[in-house]
Amino acid sequence: MAITGLGIVSPYGGGLDDFFQRLLAGESAVRHLVTDDVPRPLSIPFVGCPGFDAEKALGKPLALMMERFSQLGVAAAFAAWEHAGLLREAVEDGQRDNWGCIWGTALGGILAYEKGYRDMWIKGRERLSPLAVVLGMNNAVNAHISIQLGLGGVSTSHAAACASSTIAIGEAFRRVRSGEATVMLAGGSDVSQAYGVARAWEAMRVMAPGDGDTAAFACRPFAQDRRGLVLGEGGAALVLEDWDHAVARGARIQGEIVGYGTSCDHSHLVRPESRGQVRALRAALADARLETTDIGYINAHGTATLEGDPVEIAALKAVFAEQAAALPVSATKSMHGHLLGAAGAIEAVTTVLALREQAIPPTAHLRGRLDPACEGVDHVLEGRRGLRLKAAISNSFAFGGSNAVLAFRAVPQHIL
């Protein structure tokens, strides 16, 4: 199945090429966030999108109808739609009746809800904004996308913690493959700088500390001295399209999505379990009809939590066996942070770009500090270029034991 459009709103502020080149260079977007307009000052490493101007990207009337997670998501979707050459394409009546949008978000409009709670319980206001409900609902992004782009097919959202947007992309893939849809827009967006969200993750003791100059190096997946994840915000989207339809309209095909696997650990709410991850990895490979020898890169879930990283490596070693030692693996969350429900989407875009550009971004900040429990694969320490990648995998493993894996294949250069 063709991937004809990619779109992101990233902390780097540029387009796709700038985003990927900065990842290849190992450039961290993590900064020190200090917020004073809360009950107690918030001071954490964070990955934001300070250069994103919603009114410029979407127009003021539309931007005012959206919470920030929707603004980020719709902007990413519009960028992907334009990248696919569909934004200005003439469409006959009814042509888009089976085109749709499936979106992923873990937190949805958490900022709208938090503002409402503060207005009521702290400021003592009796009335909330009449937009409070539509700003906060999780399906606001896919609703706005479908309305603005005239998509008459499925329009829904998935909330499965950190696997949300990977599942959204996988389910969109299935819709096109089954013939139910010709074109699907899929992705995810999340905003996690809400005071309550940060305090909740802090209470779990899975957030990396760091201030000032050390914040940029706070997220260290697979490192022996890792201290936890770094929260972030952003959005990413992919346009998935029936191959024949894409070729017929002369689309530039960016890559191919070929497999999707899911599973549940069914063992613990927050403690990952490798056997469940193994099932998802094997399901994606089988769905894609790929052998383990076909895979040239793994974009790992790699959050830099103490428990999560070794479990993922154990799963990869179980699936790839003797090939695991030569399997290139990197965790780009070390640079763009953990976007929660949007993580899978930005990492799917990264994986497609890796295949398109025949280059692999590194796990930043890992040099010389590898955890012995994470040994057994080829950890990418610096960006690699000039490769011959055939296929790659992107992993998302979430709280609740929700595991989702996407498999992608490179397309010949004459098609790109």
Image (cartoon, grey):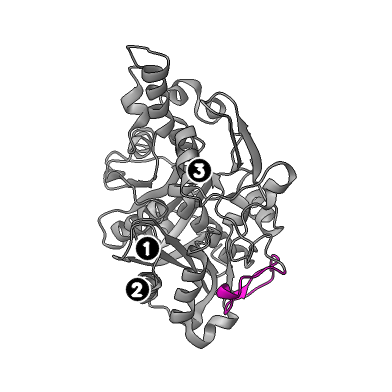
Q: CA distance from mark 3 to mark 1?
A: 31 Å
**Label 1 is placed on what type of residue?**
Asn
Q: Quadrant of residue 33?
A: top right
Q: CA distance from mark 2 to mark 3?
A: 36 Å
Asked if the residue under mark 2 is in contact with the one under mark 1, i.e. CB atoms within 8 Å, the reply is yes
At 58% from the left and 50% from the top, the residue drawn is: 208
Of the numbered discs in the image, which one, if any, rests on residue 82?
A: 3
At 32% from the left and 38% from the top, the residue drawn is: 139
Q: Indicate left or right for 359 with 118 as reference.
A: right
Q: Earlier in the sequence, mark 3 or mark 1?
A: 3
Q: Nearer the viewer, residue 335 or 134?
A: 335
Q: Residue furthest right?
A: 213
Q: Nearer the viewer, residue 69 or 160?
A: 160
**Label 2 is placed on what type of residue?**
Arg
Labels 2, 3: front one: 2
Residue at numbered disc 1: 403
Residue 71 belongs to magenta span: no
Where is residue 214? Give x, y as percent: 71, 48
In the image, is residue 199 above or below residue 283? Answer: above
- Image quadrant where one finds the N terminus: bottom left
**Label 3 is placed on what type of residue?**
Glu
Give, as a single range, the part of the protein colored magenta.
368-387
SS of the residue under disc 2: helix
Q: Earlier in the sequence, mark 2 or mark 3?
A: 3
Q: CA distance from mark 1 to mark 2?
A: 9 Å
In the image, is residue 314 above or below residue 190? Answer: below
Labels 3, 1: front one: 1
